[in-house]
Image (cartoon, helix red, strand yellow):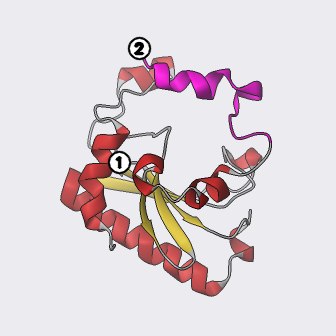
């Protein structure tokens, strides 16, 4: 398997490119280049972005603008918008990719598996029957049949402007 785009992630110090100054979930929306950063939608309290290191094609995240690390700290209005975006994401993924199911959830804290533990985010992962292949099972490797730019173009029409 040749996946050179993964090198920046695996070669970063401590295996985590998100260490160091700034927060990727704070920095990306500030760049105001939604196509390049793969931001699918922006709301008043949250935004939707494709995961740069997806578990499956179409894997996206709903992220509050507020730099918080616990769901219990998220204001109710932001929580409501987060869940509304999750519903919109599921509808957009259904229309563009026709998955057979979804994993929707979040990991809070490094001990729970959060790759970016200091900024809360909700994963929406489309799933297909039989999509766990031998590469993930024995090689800790995933095969992505679609480039992020193509996924972005397919999903963007499903989100409000």
Location of residue 122 with respect to 133 vertically, above or below: below
Residue at (70, 33) in percent of width and height: 16
Q: Is residue 146 left or right of residue 138?
A: left
Q: Is residue 99 visible?
A: no
**Where does the image place residue 39, in percent across and percent down from the top left?**
45, 57
- Label for residue 16? none
Magenta residue check for 14: yes
Residue named by callout 2:
2
Residue named by callout 1:
58
Most distant residue in the top direction: 1
Residue at (50, 79) in percent of width and height: 81
Q: Is residue 24 visible?
A: yes
Residue 79, located in which quarter of the rendered image?
Answer: bottom right
Most distant residue in the bottom direction: 77
Say which element carries label 1: loop
Residue at (72, 75) in percent of width and height: 72
């Amino acid at each position: 398997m040749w996946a050179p785009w993964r090198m920046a992630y695996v070669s970063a110090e401590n295996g985590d490119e998100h260490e160091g100054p700034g927060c990727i979930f704070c920095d990306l929306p500030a760049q105001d280049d939604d196509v390049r950063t793969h931001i699918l939608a922006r709301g008043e309290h949250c935004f939707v972005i494709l995961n740069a290191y997806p578990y499956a094609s179409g894997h996206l995240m709903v992220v509050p603008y507020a730099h918080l690390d616990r769901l219990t700290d998220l204001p109710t209005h932001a929580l409501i918008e987060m869940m509304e975006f999750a519903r919109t994401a599921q509808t957009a993924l259904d229309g563009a990719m026709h998955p057979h199911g979804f994993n929707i959830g979040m990991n809070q804290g490094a001990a729970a598996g959060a790759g970016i533990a200091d900024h809360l985010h909700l994963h929406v992962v489309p799933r297909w029957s039989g999509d766990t292949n031998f590469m993930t099972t024995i090689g800790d490797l995933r095969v992505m049949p679609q480039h992020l730019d193509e996924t972005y173009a397919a999903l963007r029409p499903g989100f409000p402007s």
